[in-house]
Image (cartoon, rainbow, N blue to C red):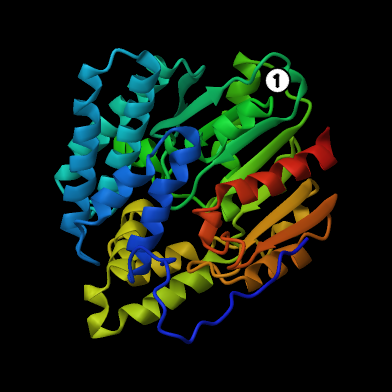
C-alpha cells in the first residue's frame, strides 16, 4: 500500500501559510514531536507555538529556556484549578514540555538531572489525576534494570493481541504513552511499553548502553509479563524510530512475536552513521545542532568516547543477516522525506524478509502530511494504517 502525490509548486508572491516551524531540521522536527502529543492530551497547540516564538533558530539554550519556562507555567496554573481531570492533563503537558526542554541538552549538562526528575514526576502526577490505568515495573537486567509500563485495555483486552511498544535512539518510556498507548486503549487493546539498554531511565539511572542483540532485553520483558500477567495468544511488537531495527531484530529470535512493525524501518544503521561521520569532517559541523546532537547522543547511548568508535559500535545494527529469520507478519512504515533513514531501506528490509508470513509497506508522501520520520505531525495517519493492519491480520 502506497500513498503517492505531489505538492503543487508555487511561483507567485502571494502570502501563504508555512509548513515549517524552523529552517533547522532538528528544531522543526522536535517542535512536531512536541505537538504530536496533542491527541493524547500531552500538548496544546498555542502553548507550543508561543514557546517557539521566543527561540532563535539553532539556539539550544533558548530552546531549553522556552520549554522549561512553559513547563513551569503549566504546572503553576494547576493550583488554581479545581478540576482533577484538567489538572491531570496539565501535568501530562508539563511532562512533555520538560522532555522537550531536556532533549537538546548535552549529555553532561547539569540541567539534565533536575529536568529529568521533574519530567517523570509530572508524568506520574498526570497519570494519577487523569485516572489512566497503568502499572510501572522494573526488572533486574545485567548490572541494572529495565523499565516498563503496562497499560491494561478495557474489558476483554486479554483476548486481543498484546501490543508491545519500544522506542529508539532518543525516546523515553513515558513518551510512549502518547505515541500509541492511548490510541490503542480507545480501540480495546492493552499495551506493554518498555525501555532497554541505551534508552531513557535505563541509560540515565543504570548506565546501561545500547546492544545490537535486542532480543535479550525484549525476551526478559516478555518473560516478566507472562510470569506476572498471562501468556498472550498473539504479540505484536512495534518499534519506533531506531526501534525499526530493534523490534525486527527481536522478532527474528523470539517466536512469541506474531507481528512486528517497523515504525519507521531501520534496516542498516551503519550506513547512516557513516553519513554523519562524513558530515562531521566539515569544520562548520560544530555549528550545526543537527549534527552536534546526533554525535553527542551516539557517544552517550553507545558508551564510547569518539566518533570513529561510535561508527564501529553502530555497524552491527543491521538486519541484513537476521531479517530472513522473521516468521511473523511484518508491517513497514515509511516517511517519504525521512531525514534520518533513506526510503530505500524499506525495500531492502522487505526483500530480506524471506520467511515472513506476510510483508506490507505503507509509504506516506509530503502531501499526506506524514512524510517526516515516524510520521510526526500526522499521527492519525500511521495509526489508521497500523490498526487497519491489526484488524486484517489478527482479529
Q: Position of residue 361 (x, y in %)?
A: 74, 60
Q: Does any portion of residue 195 appear in the rendered image?
A: no
Q: Is residue 36 left or right of residue 21?
A: right
Q: Is residue 27 above or below residue 249?
A: below
Which residue does the image show at 78% across and 56% down from the upper left? Answer: 360
Q: Does any portion of residue 33 appear in the rendered image?
A: yes
Which residue does the image show at 16% across and 44% down from the upper left? Answer: 111
Toward which corner of the image does residue 257 lie, by quadrant? top right
Q: Position of residue 241 (x, y in %)?
A: 52, 54
Residue under numbered circle 1: 157
Residue that lies at the very extreme toward the bottom in this rendered image:
11
In the foreground, 148 or 215: 148
Q: Callout 1 environment at 10 Å: few (<14), some (14 to 19), or many (20+)?
A: some
In the foreground, 358 or 108: 358
Q: Position of residue 74 (x, y in %)?
A: 25, 32
In the foreground, 195 or 367: 367
Which residue does the image show at 55% across and 23% down from the upper left? Answer: 151
Q: Is residue 80 above or below residue 189?
A: above
Where is the N terminus found, in terms of image quarters?
bottom right
User: How many numbered marks are there?
Assistant: 1
- What kind of element bears circle 1? helix
Amino acid at each position: 500500500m502506497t500513498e503517492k502525490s505531489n505538492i503543487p509548486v508555487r511561483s507567485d508572491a502571494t502570502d501563504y501559510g508555512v509548513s515549517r516551524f524552523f529552517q533547522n531540521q532538528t528544531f522543526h522536527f522536535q517542535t512536531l514531536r512536541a505537538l504530536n502529543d496533542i491527541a493524547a492530551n500531552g500538548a496544546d497547540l498555542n502553548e507550543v507555538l508561543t514557546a517557539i516564538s521566543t527561540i532563535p533558530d539553532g539556539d539550544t539554550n533558548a530552546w531549553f529556556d522556552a520549554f522549561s519556562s512553559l513547563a513551569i507555567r503549566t504546572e503553576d496554573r494547576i493550583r488554581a484549578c479545581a478540576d482533577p481531570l484538567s489538572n491531570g492533563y496539565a501535568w501530562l503537558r508539563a511532562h512533555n514540555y520538560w522532555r522537550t526542554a531536556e532533549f537538546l541538552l548535552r549529555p553532561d549538562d547539569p540541567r539534565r538531572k533536575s529536568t529529568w526528575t521533574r519530567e517523570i514526576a509530572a508524568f506520574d502526577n498526570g497519570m494519577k489525576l487523569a485516572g489512566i490505568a497503568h502499572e510501572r515495573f522494573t526488572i533486574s537486567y545485567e548490572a541494572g534494570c529495565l523499565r516498563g509500563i503496562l497499560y491494561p485495555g478495557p474489558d476483554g483486552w486479554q483476548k486481543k493481541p498484546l501490543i508491545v511498544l519500544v522506542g529508539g535512539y532518543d525516546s523515553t518510556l513515558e513518551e510512549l504513552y502518547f505515541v500509541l498507548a492511548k490510541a490503542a486503549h480507545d480501540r480495546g487493546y492493552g499495551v506493554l511499553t518498555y525501555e532497554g539498554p541505551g534508552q531513557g531511565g535505563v541509560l540515565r539511572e543504570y548506565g546501561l548502553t545500547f546492544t545490537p542483540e535486542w532480543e535479550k532485553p525484549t525476551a526478559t520483558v516478555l518473560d516478566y509479563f507472562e510470569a506476572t500477567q498471562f501468556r498472550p495468544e498473539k504479540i505484536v511488537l512495534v518499534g519506533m524510530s531506531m526501534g525499526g531495527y530493534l523490534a525486527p531484530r527481536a522478532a527474528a529470535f523470539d517466536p512469541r512475536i506474531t507481528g512486528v512493525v517497523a515504525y519507521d524501518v531501520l534496516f542498516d544503521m551503519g550506513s547512516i552513521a557513516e553519513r554523519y561521520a562524513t558530515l562531521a569532517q566539515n569544520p562548520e559541523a560544530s555549528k550545526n545542532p543537527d549534527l552536534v546532537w546526533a554525535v553527542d547522543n551516539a557517544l552517550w547511548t553507545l558508551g564510547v568516547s569518539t566518533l570513529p568508535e561510535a561508527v564501529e559500535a553502530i555497524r552491527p545494527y543491521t538486519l541484513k543477516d537476521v531479517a530472513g529469520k522473521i516468521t511473523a507478519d511484518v508491517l513497514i512504515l515509511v516517511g517519504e522525506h525521512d531525514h534520518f533513514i533513506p526510503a530505500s531501506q524499506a525495500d531492502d528490509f522487505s526483500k530480506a524478509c524471506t520467511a515472513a508470513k506476510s510483508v506490507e509497506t505503507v509509504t506516506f508522501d509530503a502531501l499526506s502530511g506524514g512524510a517526516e520520520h515516524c510520521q510526526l505531525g500526522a499521527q492519525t495517519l500511521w495509526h489508521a494504517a497500523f490498526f487497519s493492519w491489526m484488524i486484517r491480520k489478527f482479529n
